[in-house]
Image (tube, rainbow, N blue to C red):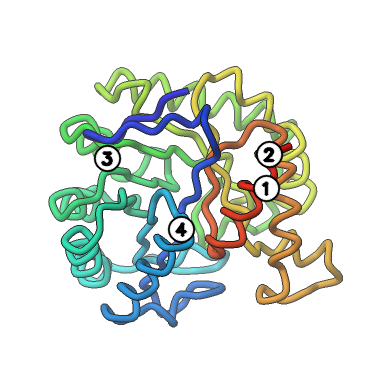
Amino acid sequence: MIFKAKEKTFDISDRPLVMGVLNVTPDSFYDGAGHADLETSLRRVESMIEDGADIIDVGGESTRPGSKAVEVNEEVRRVLPVIEEISKKFEIPLSIDTYKPAVARKAIECGAVIINDIYALTYDDGEMASVAAASGVGVILMHMKGSPETMQNNPSYSDVVKEIKDFFTERLDFALKKGIGSENIMIDPGIGFGKTFQHNIALIKKLNEFLELKRPIVVGLSRKSFIGKILDDAPPEDRLFGTMAANMSAYLNGARIFRVHDVKATRDFFNVLSVF
């Protein structure tokens, strides 16, 4: 299967793609504050590239459960200098983790080739779809119930897999009608975004049902709380091995793009798995 992002084409039938997370925020649940200045961010990017990252995903607003939105100008202030410098120094494709069209537009001007949108083009009257269509960037459509601030307030579904699959069917149709190419779209079921522990487990077990939509599946499982719950309430820093197990399950069920904090561990894991 092919995924296109401007002039870049990814063939995900060959091997899984590793998307390294670069949070330039003061409040992300695991590693945000550690990469808040430009030089630290650039060293982190260089390290992730050396470790085998295929894409770097830059985010300037935490979307952890309970987090509040930041103003557009503040998000721009956080991410633009980083994207601009990464684009100058490295050739790795960049993704901008934002749902705000104004932020995405500026990030694309500075070199981003993918929009990672937790609102799946629904925010701000769908203006993000126009930004994506006009620029030819790739888009990750993610499912979320509610907003980051409210999403974990007793989320409920009658059938979590069916409802999210129906959501993606509608979102894909919307994107195509807005002029975004099918090959420019990936889908992310949004593990941990408006889902209970059981919802997360069910989605990972049944990811293969989303393959019927014929778009690459992205997952972001890295050190999330559902893994901590399985591991007797282990804190984020003790969830690496659990993350690897969850990633393997997701891979066996059809996921091919993995958004992670631990690039080297993930790349090594899939390199060894591919031999067998």
Marks 1 and 3, how far apart at CA: 38 Å
x 15%, y 55%: residue: 110
| Percent position of residue 267, x then y | 57, 53
162 or 191: nearer the viewer: 191
Pointer 1 residue: 272
x 53%, y 64%: residue:
261
| Element carrying mark 4 | strand
Relative image position of residue 37 (x, y in whole percent): 30, 81
Which mark, by number, is residue 128?
A: 3
Does label 4 or label 2 sit earlier along the sequence?
Answer: 4
Which structural element holds mark 2? helix
| Pick the front one: 59 or 152 | 59
Pair 1/3: label in front: 1
- Contact check, label 1 and label 2, Cβ < 8 Å: yes
Residue 203 screen position, x and y as percent: 71, 38
231 shown above or below 9:
below
Q: Which residue is mark 2?
A: 275
Task: Give the residue type at disc 1.
Answer: Val
Q: Amino acid at mark 4?
A: Gly
Q: Which is nearer the N-term, disc 3 or disc 4? A: 4
Instruction: Please give the name of the residue rendered at 68% of the width and 27% of the height, measured from the top-left corner.
Output: 208
Q: Amino acid at mark 3?
A: Met
Circle on res. 20: 4
As measured in the structure, the alpha-carbon distance from the residue carrying label 4 to the one carrying label 2 is: 23 Å
